[in-house]
């Protein structure tokens, strides 16, 4: 039997829900529908043990506790976590200052990937950046990180530059941006 997950997300992702429903109708499927409730909320210091486990499992040069404490405290930073069935499944760190916002960090627990959690976190960050008045959302991604690049492209980010051998003097960083002025209209 075909199993489709439908994400019930506290903030956004109506677009994701629409895509899933269109997909079901087009394929004339009779799926078993599983409701997953993802709670998106601001990160607190109490989240950091779980956040650090995900961070260490996700990056060769992970952020430490002080990095995240700084993001929680900083005036223009908006770190958020995704909680799934009482378990912290991922997080995103957004900084937004005047017209420009930046994604500083995003990761999902390895065993929770492929369920739309990063999509939900990014949509949350995009919504927050628009709300704070940003007109542009920027980020850097390792050129070999295909999963992340596909995620950003899916959300309308475009490649705008390269920093050669930025990571450990080996991998390039791809600079990507999303114009949020257009996004206000499409959301
Ligand atoms: C990149 C990452 C955040 C994606 O998280 P995720 O929750 O698995 O992603 P989602 O399930 O929300 O996927 C959303 C979209 O991203 C893309 N994507 C995600 N994983 C992918 C993969 N393994 N291969 C190709 N595309 C992928 C797809 O476009 C996907 O949409 P689709 O499922 O409709 O095809 C996750 O792999 C991760 O934590 N990686 C380690 C940390 C990291 O690299 N962070 C980015 C730093 S720039």
Image: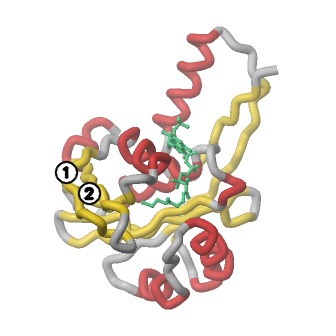
Q: Residue drawn 19% across and 51% down? A: 160
Residue 154 in picture, x, y percent from top left = 40, 39
Q: What is the number of callouts on the image? A: 2
Residue 137 in picture, x, y percent from top left = 27, 57
Mark 1 and ligand 1: say if the CB distance to the nearest ligand atom is below 8 Å.
no
Q: Is residue 45 above or below residue 33?
A: below
Among the 4 quarters of the image, the one containing residue 74: bottom left
Q: Using residue 180 as the reference point, say whether residue 71 is left or right of it.
A: right
Mark 2 and ligand 1: say if the CB distance to the nearest ligand atom is below 8 Å.
no
The numbered disc on residue 175 is 2
Q: Earlier in the sequence, mark 1 or mark 2?
A: 1
| Residue toward you, 22 or 68 | 68
Q: Residue drawn 75% across and 28% down? A: 3
Q: Residue drawn 36% across and 41% down? A: 153
Q: Cα distance, mark 1 to mark 2?
A: 6 Å
Q: Is residue 69 above or below residue 138?
A: below
Q: Is residue 38 above or below residue 185?
A: below
Q: Using residue 71 as the reference point, say whether residue 60 is left or right of it.
A: right
Which residue is the site of mark 1?
Answer: 160
Residue 123 in picture, x, y percent from top left = 44, 50
Q: Using residue 144 as the reference point, say whether residue 30 is left or right of it.
A: right
| Residue toward you, 172 or 132 | 172
Residue with the most extreme front position: 170
Q: Is residue 12 above or below residue 18?
A: below
Alpha-carbon neighbours of circle 1 within 10 Å: few (<14), some, or many (≥20)?
few
| Residue contact between numbered discs 1 and 2, judged by CB atoms under 8 Å | yes
| Residue toward you, 165 or 187 | 165
Mark 1 element type: strand
Image quarter (top left, top right, bottom left or bottom right) of the N terminus = top right
Alpha-carbon neighbours of circle 2 within 10 Å: few (<14), some, or many (≥20)?
some
């Amino acid at each position: 039997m075909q199993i489709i997950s439908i994400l019930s997300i506290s903030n956004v992702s109506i677009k994701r829900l629409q895509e899933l429903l269109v997909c079901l109708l087009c394929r004339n499927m009779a799926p078993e529908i599983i409701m997953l409730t993802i709670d998106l909320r601001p990160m607190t210091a109490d989240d950091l043990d779980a956040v650090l486990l995900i961070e260490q499992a996700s990056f060769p040069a992970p952020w430490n506790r002080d990095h995240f404490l700084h993001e929680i405290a900083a005036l223009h930073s908006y770190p958020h976590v995704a909680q799934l069935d009482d378990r912290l499944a991922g997080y995103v760190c957004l900084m937004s200052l005047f017209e420009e916002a930046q994604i500083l960090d995003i990761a999902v627990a390895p065993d929770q990937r492929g369920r739309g959690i990063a999509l939900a976190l990014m949509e949350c960050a995009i919504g927050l950046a628009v709300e704070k008045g940003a007109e542009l959302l920027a980020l850097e991604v390792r050129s070999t990180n295909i999963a992340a690049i596909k995620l950003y492209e899916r959300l309308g980010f475009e490649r705008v530059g390269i920093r050669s051998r930025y990571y450990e003097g080996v991998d390039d960083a791809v600079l990507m941006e999303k114009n949020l002025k257009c996004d206000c209209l499409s959301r």
